[in-house]
Image: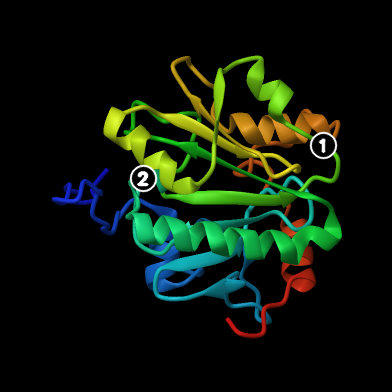
């Protein structure tokens, strides 16, 4: 990582810019930038994939969506995970994610998840170390049983509680079920990269195309952008 990151007196990692991060490149210089993973989406009719943004948070459709309506809530600046963001920003991100879930609920009951890395060597199954919370309409599908086969979880009430993971240096998986229950799992095992994408895809009988990099599914990304409008972005 090239991001300059320190710990403030309040205990929160400060934000920065990671020159090797595709999200940072996209938010700083646009989706067409050479380092942006989203550049394959760009067409003469579509110059970006942002659904909504402000100075701190951004909502975009994910590449390689599991289903139509699969989007992410990201911090604009570079934090490793939501365990690293200041409390006020975590609260705002959680409220924004709730709004996003309401907007996609017409496509199915939403779930949310995040892989929480602590370092390049302790990724918690993440493949990109920039805070991003997945929101996707999965209907009646619940991933908890699949997660429980690998990890031991505990109930939490808010994203703010993820900060304890950073204080412990503990990688994690965060999962919010369709029933609205939030679960936090310590990752002390060698978890496969994109573990939750694999689970979600397998739950829909797709055991092959879970890797967003290999299978970007641009048709579904464009369908998501066409489906979700946010007039006040």
Residue sitting at x 52%, y 21%: 191
**Residue 153, percent from left and from top:** 56, 23
Relative to residue 128, is residue 108 depicted above or below? below
The answer to which image quadrant residue 56 occupies is: bottom left
Helix, strand, or loop for circle 2? loop
Residue lying at 46% horizontally and 66% vertically, measured from the top left: 57
- Residue 133 seen in the current view: yes
**The N terminus lies in which quarter of the figure?**
top left
The C terminus lies in quadrant = bottom right
Residue at point 66%, 39% (across, down): 181
Q: Which x, y percent locates residue 88?
A: 37, 61
The mark that comes first in sequence, 1 or 2, is: 2
Count neighbours of disc 2 (C-alpha within 10 A) and say few if under 14, some if 14 to 19, many if 20 or more.
Answer: many
| Of the two numbered discs 1 and 2 in the rendering, the one whose residue sits closer to the viewer | 1
Residue behind mark 1:
141
Say left or right for 92 vs 4. Answer: right
Residue at mark 2 = 80
Residue name at image x 75 percent, y 58 percent: 69
Helix, strand or loop at label 1? It is loop
């Amino acid at each position: 990582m090239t991001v300059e990151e320190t710990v403030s007196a309040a205990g929160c990692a400060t934000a920065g810019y990671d020159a090797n991060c595709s999200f940072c490149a996209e938010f700083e210089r646009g989706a067409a930038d050479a380092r942006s993973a989203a550049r394959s989406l760009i067409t003469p009719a579509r110059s970006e994939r942002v659904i909504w943004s402000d100075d701190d948070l951004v909502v975009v459709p994910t590449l390689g969506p599991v289903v139509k309506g699969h989007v992410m809530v990201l911090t604009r600046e570079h934090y490793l995970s939501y365990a690293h963001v200041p409390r006020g920003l975590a609260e705002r991100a959680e409220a924004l994610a709730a709004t996003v879930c309401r907007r996609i609920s017409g496509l199915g009951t939403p779930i949310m998840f995040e892989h929480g890395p602590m370092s390049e060597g302790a990724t918690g199954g993440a493949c990109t170390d920039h805070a991003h919370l997945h929101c996707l309409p999965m209907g009646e599908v619940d991933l908890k049983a699949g997660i429980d086969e690998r990890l031991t979880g505990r109930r939490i009430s808010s994203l703010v509680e993820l900060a304890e993971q950073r204080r412990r240096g503990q990688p994690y998986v965060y999962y919010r079920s369709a029933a609205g229950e939030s679960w936090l799992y310590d990752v002390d095992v060698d978890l496969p990269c994109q573990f939750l994408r694999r689970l979600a895809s397998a739950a829909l009988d797709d055991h092959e195309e879970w890797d967003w990099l290999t299978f970007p599914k641009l048709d579904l990304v464009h369908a998501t952008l066409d489906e979700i409008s946010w007039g006040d972005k």
